[in-house]
């Protein structure tokens, strides 16, 4: 197999995966627009259907002690069929319109 044939196969696999994504809440293939805040975090739970919980660390300065305090935040995000991230993956999430009562973010990129 040549390098060109391998690249063609990869492109056809990607196009098949994107053609199979019929998720209306997908920011790439659906009608969901993104706006607002962007975070990079780690998926700590993927037990929900088409949803993940993402956690990211942040530092808060405490003026009284002149030190930084370690805190973390977490949010539920929509997991589109075309990305299908798993627990332990590092992902990029972006704010969108409310998808459900607790989901206001959508996964747009799988980093690791």
Image: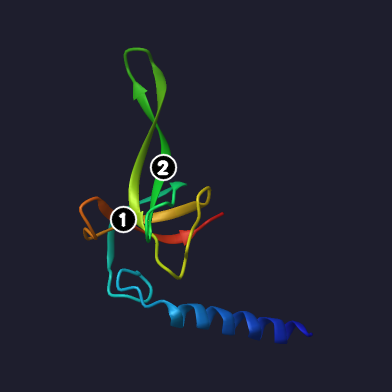
- Which quadrant of the rendered structure holds the C terminus? bottom right
Question: What's the residue at 43%, 55% (across, down)?
Answer: 92
> Could you classify mark 2 by the number of other residues whose Cα lies within 10 Å: few (under 14), some (14-19), or many (20 or more)?
some
- Which quadrant of the rendered structure holds the N terminus? bottom right
Q: Is residue 42 above or below residue 49?
A: above
> How far from the left and from the top, in percent, is residue 67?
41, 18
> How far from the left and from the top, in percent, is residue 43?
46, 48
Identify the disc placed on residue 105. Answer: 1
Picture mark count: 2
Question: What's the residue at 24%, 50% (across, down)?
Answer: 102
* SS at circle 2: strand
Direction from residue 51 to residue 109 in the image, left or right: right
Question: What's the residue at 46%, 78% (across, down)?
Answer: 18
Q: In whole angstroms, how far apart are the C-alphas of marks 2 and 1?
A: 12 Å
* SS at circle 1: strand
Identify the disc placed on residue 55. Answer: 2
**Residue in the foreground of this view, choosing between 95 and 64:** 95
User: Looking at the image, is mark 2 or mark 1 earlier in the sequence?
Assistant: 2
> Could you classify mark 1 by the number of other residues whose Cα lies within 10 Å: few (under 14), some (14-19), or many (20 or more)?
many
Identify the disc placed on residue 10. Answer: none
Which residue is most to the top? Answer: 65
Question: What's the residue at 53%, 47% (across, down)?
Answer: 88
Colour pattern of the rendering? rainbow
> How far from the left and from the top, in percent, is residue 80?
40, 66
Q: Is residue 31 above or below residue 112?
A: below
Q: Is residue 98 above or below residue 57?
A: below
**Residue in the foreground of this view, choosing between 25 and 4:** 25
Residue 32 figure quarter: bottom left
Which residue is most to the right? Answer: 1
Q: Are marks 2 and 1 in contact (CB under 8 Å)?
A: no
**Residue in the foreground of this view, choosing between 98 and 94:** 98
> How far from the left and from the top, in percent, is residue 62?
34, 20
């Amino acid at each position: 197999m040549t390098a060109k044939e391998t690249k063609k196969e990869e492109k056809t696999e990607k196009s098949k995966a994107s053609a199979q994504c019929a998720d209306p809440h997908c920011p790439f293939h659906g009608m969901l627009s993104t706006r607002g805040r962007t975070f990079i975090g780690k998926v700590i739970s993927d037990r929900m259907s088409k949803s993940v919980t993402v956690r990211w660390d942040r530092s808060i300065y405490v003026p009284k002690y002149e030190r930084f305090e370690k805190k973390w935040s977490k949010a539920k995000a929509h997991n589109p069929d075309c990305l299908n991230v798993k627990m332990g993956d590092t992902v990029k999430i972006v704010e969108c319109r409310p998808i459900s009562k607790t989901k206001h973010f959508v996964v747009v990129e799988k980093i690791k």
